[in-house]
Image (spheres, rainbow, N blue to C red):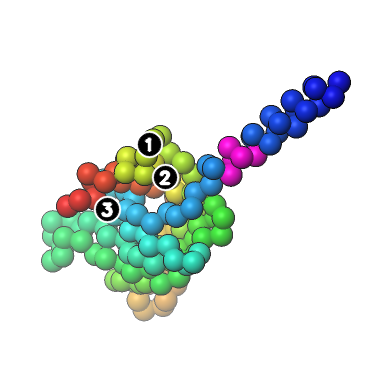
Amino acid sequence: MVFVLSAVLFAIGMAEAQKDSDEIVDITGKYQFLTADDTLALLEEDGKLKGYVDVSQSDEESDSFLSYPIVQGSRKKNHVEFKTSKIHQRYFRFAGTVERGAGIEASDPDYLRLVGALEIVASKGETGEEFVQRLQVVFKSRGKSETDD
């Protein structure tokens, strides 16, 4: 009986150690945003997130990308939130979790995933009335070879 109890306690301890080793320490990196051409870049420092979202524009636009700086961002354990600045009466808000992806090493594509709700907030210039488009999204981290450009 003592042997069985010891074995069970040992197995529980090993499971806890495995769980702790899977903890995601840092989410700094580049992630695919809404399309393959869009980028979410994050820098995590002491639970605060900085960075930007680059969104590709149509051929009719003067700029090929609009870069939305992150003005508020935080991470507490696996919960992630950020909000970008407003450009052309539009900004982005995200709330979700960070998870391990299919990648094996940090340099692999899809090593980390941000999974949650993205809100694309647009406002009318005259009235300031906001319209919110809500999407369930998965932002996959880009691999080292994808971010070396």
Is 128 located above or below residue 80 in the figure? below
Q: Residue furthest right?
A: 1
In-image side of 24 versus 64 (left or right) = right
User: Residue 112 location in percent, x, y?
Assistant: 41, 45
Is 59 located above or below residue 68 in the figure? above
Write the residue at 36% across / 44% down.
Answer: 106
In-image side of 74 versus 10 (left or right) = left
Q: Which residue is label 2 attached to?
A: 112
Which element type, helix, strand or loop, lies under badge 2?
strand
Q: Which residue is label 3 attached to?
A: 38
Q: Earlier in the sequence, mark 3 or mark 2?
A: 3
User: Residue 14 location in percent, x, y?
Assistant: 64, 34
Q: Quadrant of residue 83?
A: bottom left
**Can see residue 134?**
no
Write the residue at 13% across / 66% down.
Answer: 62
Identify the amino acid type marked 1: Gly
Which residues make up the magenta segment? 16-20
Which element type, helix, strand or loop, lies under badge 3?
loop
**Can see residue 30?**
yes
Identify the amino acid type marked 2: Leu
User: Residue 135 location in percent, x, y?
Assistant: 44, 50
Q: Which residue is label 1 attached to?
A: 103
- Using a 10 Å C-alpha cutoff, classify the residue at mark 1 as few (fewer than 14 neighbours), some (14 to 19) or many (20 or more): some
CA gap, disc 3 and disc 1: 20 Å
The numbered dot on residue 6 is none
Is 41 located above or below residue 125 in the figure? above
CA gap, disc 3 and disc 2: 17 Å
**Magenta residues, dominant SS class:** helix
Q: Does the segment drawn in magenta span residue 21?
A: no
Which element type, helix, strand or loop, lies under badge 1?
loop
Circles 1 and 2, Cβ within 8 Å, touching? The answer is yes
In-image side of 17 versus 115 (left or right) = right
